[in-house]
Image (cartoon, coloured by chain):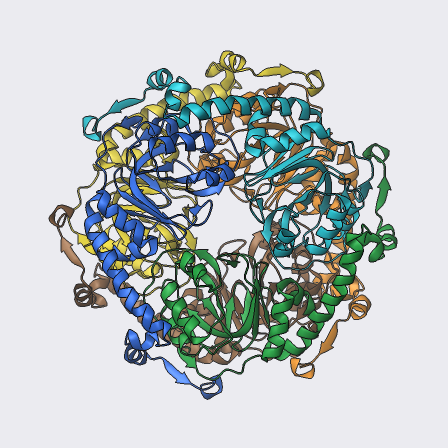
Chain colours: A cyan, B blue, C green, D orange, E yellow, F brown
Amino acid sequence: MKTVAVRKVARAEARFVDVLAQCGVATVHEAQGRTGLLQPYVRPIFPGSRIAGSAVTALAHPGDNWMMHVVAEMIQPGDIVVVGLSAPNTDGMFGDLLATSFKARGARGLVIDAGVRDVRDLQAMGFPVWSKAISAKGTVKETLGAVNVPVVVAGQLVRPGDAIVADDDGVVVVPRGDVAEVADAARKREANEAAKRERLAAGELGLDIYKMRERLAQEGLVYVDSLDEID
Amino acid sequence: MKTVAVRKVARAEARFVDVLAQCGVATVHEAQGRTGLLQPYVRPIFPGSRIAGSAVTALAHPGDNWMMHVVAEMIQPGDIVVVGLSAPNTDGMFGDLLATSFKARGARGLVIDAGVRDVRDLQAMGFPVWSKAISAKGTVKETLGAVNVPVVVAGQLVRPGDAIVADDDGVVVVPRGDVAEVADAARKREANEAAKRERLAAGELGLDIYKMRERLAQEGLVYVDSLDEID
Amino acid sequence: MKTVAVRKVARAEARFVDVLAQCGVATVHEAQGRTGLLQPYVRPIFPGSRIAGSAVTALAHPGDNWMMHVVAEMIQPGDIVVVGLSAPNTDGMFGDLLATSFKARGARGLVIDAGVRDVRDLQAMGFPVWSKAISAKGTVKETLGAVNVPVVVAGQLVRPGDAIVADDDGVVVVPRGDVAEVADAARKREANEAAKRERLAAGELGLDIYKMRERLAQEGLVYVDSLDEID
Amino acid sequence: MKTVAVRKVARAEARFVDVLAQCGVATVHEAQGRTGLLQPYVRPIFPGSRIAGSAVTALAHPGDNWMMHVVAEMIQPGDIVVVGLSAPNTDGMFGDLLATSFKARGARGLVIDAGVRDVRDLQAMGFPVWSKAISAKGTVKETLGAVNVPVVVAGQLVRPGDAIVADDDGVVVVPRGDVAEVADAARKREANEAAKRERLAAGELGLDIYKMRERLAQEGLVYVDSLDEID
Amino acid sequence: MKTVAVRKVARAEARFVDVLAQCGVATVHEAQGRTGLLQPYVRPIFPGSRIAGSAVTALAHPGDNWMMHVVAEMIQPGDIVVVGLSAPNTDGMFGDLLATSFKARGARGLVIDAGVRDVRDLQAMGFPVWSKAISAKGTVKETLGAVNVPVVVAGQLVRPGDAIVADDDGVVVVPRGDVAEVADAARKREANEAAKRERLAAGELGLDIYKMRERLAQEGLVYVDSLDEID
Amino acid sequence: MKTVAVRKVARAEARFVDVLAQCGVATVHEAQGRTGLLQPYVRPIFPGSRIAGSAVTALAHPGDNWMMHVVAEMIQPGDIVVVGLSAPNTDGMFGDLLATSFKARGARGLVIDAGVRDVRDLQAMGFPVWSKAISAKGTVKETLGAVNVPVVVAGQLVRPGDAIVADDDGVVVVPRGDVAEVADAARKREANEAAKRERLAAGELGLDIYKMRERLAQEGLVYVDSLDEID
């Protein structure tokens, strides 16, 4: 019942996904109400990438990367492969051969709640990966999982077709139905931040820009010249 | 009582702070008797920086970066902002907007016992950060902490005005009253090491340079050609 | 009885060690039947190195690097120093002075189940290190350990003279008696992978190249267009 | 949009939930195909409890337990409260007052991806809790989350009304629609195990009971009297 | 300069310390404004103890318990020994012999940011310990630390003479000058909680007792019968 | 080559093993020069056991407990089963059925560098286990490992026939050839400690019993009445 591979996935609309990529993880995460962020133990294996795409998913078992080959067939250009595990694992479930295959099919990157290897090759071929670990530990192909089912990855639910945004700050998932709204909110947020950045760069304080002084006083913050005044 | 912001901070003397920056964390840590080192989980978010400065401090609560705006007003050129947390937390309490503000006020960097975000932007603007985590997780501004009070950061007590040294090896704190003495000891240590480095580079052994052979024998170290001799 | 330093170590044959270095950790690990890999918490302190060599070993106690000086005398050109600890520890047991000495003696690198420091200097001098942590915490020279005895490092037994391979994927140990066989298997594996890489790059699927479809069906994998078909 | 509290929850059928409680976590986990297990860092705060019930859920933010009061109103007798967090957190979000309230409303226990406190009181009142940590760290009531929405807890998706089973082995979630089928499979599994337990207790080997010897030989396992035979 | 043992310590007043012991860690932590809590990785080595006392302190190095013997002489009846480490360590720095000594001198317990051993003996003799780890790893007596200086333990600064409260919820430190005030606040808090506990046990909701409904609505919490209403 | 099961194991002599059990882990660890201790993350699944026995070993892969059935046949009365893993894993590789089998064959307990389950049953049947985790996660039987080969478990090398001692303080391994000598040293150490315990219980200080005062002074420890004297 669970050992299923789903062929048809409705993807997130590309024009909104592109906006998400421009805005980056931190802004998108804020724009959708501080939700959807994968836990911070998932890190890029090399710095400097920023991608967004639609999720195709796999659920795998510790030490077994069989489903990675099944999901390869499902990849369409612009997809990001997202792999959840049935139990904590750091084995190297992905390397340069699978990356060659994924890239040839059009994948933009991989997010995996386990380990990967051949990191020097992956960087050389420009295939970005966000993983829990780097490990050369090889895997078997013995136990069925599932492909294109909802998976939990680093504490977040990812459904096939959801938008994924990944950069040096981490990985965030945006439900497919929310991408237009979130892209719009993210863009507005960016515009708003640009104005504030300029004022802050000029030495103005957030205390004044965000009008925090009154509320700080109400909550009871006391300014003193020295701790001796209050002890 | 605790929700206080202290305005006046006696800083460490700049000429000694500059010496500490030249010597780096490992040497300074040795020079003050192997004390003052923050736990090694605090790491630079990008490699290659080495700074020293006087601490201005904030005590914050998990998921709440309100006090970061209060401390911004206290920054003087040459300061390093040091942020302790009231409980373990990895949320991204600092990003490019606050960095723009801190930099405009003259801060040299940030040391924080929590997470930060916008790491690509921070690197681009050359604002170095040592943190416990990288996380895009946004924070609220709801609960008061304190500013310029003594804080515990990664296992070390930091008082406002103490000298902070930070590089790729980690972060060390030098009590303000000790900076002259520690800077002097660090410089001597460096000179001493330079001489030894030369001898070691020529192939001479530490066993001979440090005259360890006798004490090793006294303690009972036995040299054999093979383990078979002793089994 | 344990506080012994063994002088004579039979090294792995250089021509096979060189092949292992060319193949890298992931391939060598596969080539010897997925064994010998150190746990993935041992990481390079800077990226981009790939080395292989014969192990000379030290067993040290937490916070005590005395044995590092004893092992220095045992180093021959082409060796890799491998240091095990008697209990978990992250102190900085190795820095630029010892690195200068090790390098002058001909060591190719260091693998240590503890911390190291002076990482910027180590990178500048091109001396690669794989460690559990980066920490400036200084150490003492008070308690005897052993040199050139079998040690456990990050979950693997390393005997003096075993071959060590280390790169960005981690560290693998090859028993000295197996290096010829493993080098041969690794080279064959590389040739085999080159052919597959080309087919995968052309868009062919691992499902077809490895003839997985039949076995997937036998094991019960079901392809559907949508999850609605099966719920 | 996300700050919602859902009032109506279809519960798992009680007679099947009772069977799940009798079978326990390990058996239920096997009976539904080795899925649904929460990560093992979620542990009971005191040993010896075994419960099952329908999930009512809350999504909370680090250091903020406001939603725990909202979910209290939703509890019906036989429920288990399940709390997910928007970011990693160990604060003590639950103590004896909330436990008194939950118990009065009929809750059988709590599963939370954060910390709890007053553990001695909780044990005295017989209210079992599975948590990530024990911490006295107090929380605020400032930021809205959600109640009775799907939440991810320790790596698993839990929907309101799903069955939860928890004992000293951990916590497993059974989708509401699967409880009849899983309860049946679990009961059969138990019966099957009873027969095997008797044979194993009599000294018979699993090798023979499960007829493993032939397949072991096929896979290449070689029996020797000593390692000397093969080296 | 740092290798000092301070003989005279002003203790917290016993009558207030006794009140703190009655109230327990969670209540005391709340009563002093949610400050002073040691990080939750410090745990009791056996359950069921609740103690309070004045701190006598030691600063020790990894793998070296020499200072534990120096602090023994400083113990007065009613004290709790508090040990900080200069770097992360889990070695077993304390066992049944030292416990016999500490108990004979009148110590009520030990809080240590490292490991301990002989836990079965410690439980048998009724000497409670809160530690980071349990480990039989022996230690040396080679490097000086300090006694009765301020130490950082599990993220909190503890000064000699501060009050320590420890129970199954963890450990909290109360500055010596605050014990009267905190004891008073803790007692009031307990009285207040007793009244609320009764109402909650009768099935009344925190939502009503704490009058949360209006503020929840203001902040935007929406009640619905089903998620379908809002999607 | 590695997929081998060795039938004949020379056991440690029973009369010495019995002495080790009486002395316990901490004493045995000291008696053999502070070596042989497994890392402290291996913990008993229930408190109060103390056992010693000869090791029979298995090397298993993550998520695969096939070799546990092979090792069952090798068990002789008085043995302790010791299981190493080829990569980090927390799956529940052992439960009440295997425990029934192991116990029927005469095993005294299990030490495993992975997870176990059915902990309530294991406690009820009095079969002690030291493990890395408790997890209900089921395993497969697909990949060959090895039986009665040397294995690394929690950082220590264990050879078949070595003596294992395990109690609430952890687990220590004693090489088979050393058991007589270590048992003797442990017994002497116990006798010696009994005398010291009496003196310490009478209030005498370790400073005097171990004559530490002179060496403390030599090393530079300064006694003062207050920190004010030295600042």
Q: Quarter of the image for the C terminus of chain C: give it.
A: top right
Residue located 29% across and 58% down the image:
B30
**Which of the pair D80/B180 is nearer the observer?**
B180
Q: Is residue D200 above or below residue D102?
A: below
Q: Is residue F192 above or below residue D108?
A: below
In the visual, does F18 lie left or right of A221? right
Residue located 69% across and 68% down the image:
C31
Furthest-bottom residue in this view = B229
Percent position of residue F6, x then y: 67, 76
- Residue D55 appears in the picture as rendered: no
Percent position of residue A162, x then y: 70, 32
Percent position of residue B52, x then y: 31, 45
**Which of the pair D157/D13 is nearer the observer?**
D157
In the visual, does E188 lie left or right of A112? left
Q: Is residue B198 above or below residue C14?
A: above
In the visual, does C57 lie left or right of C36? left
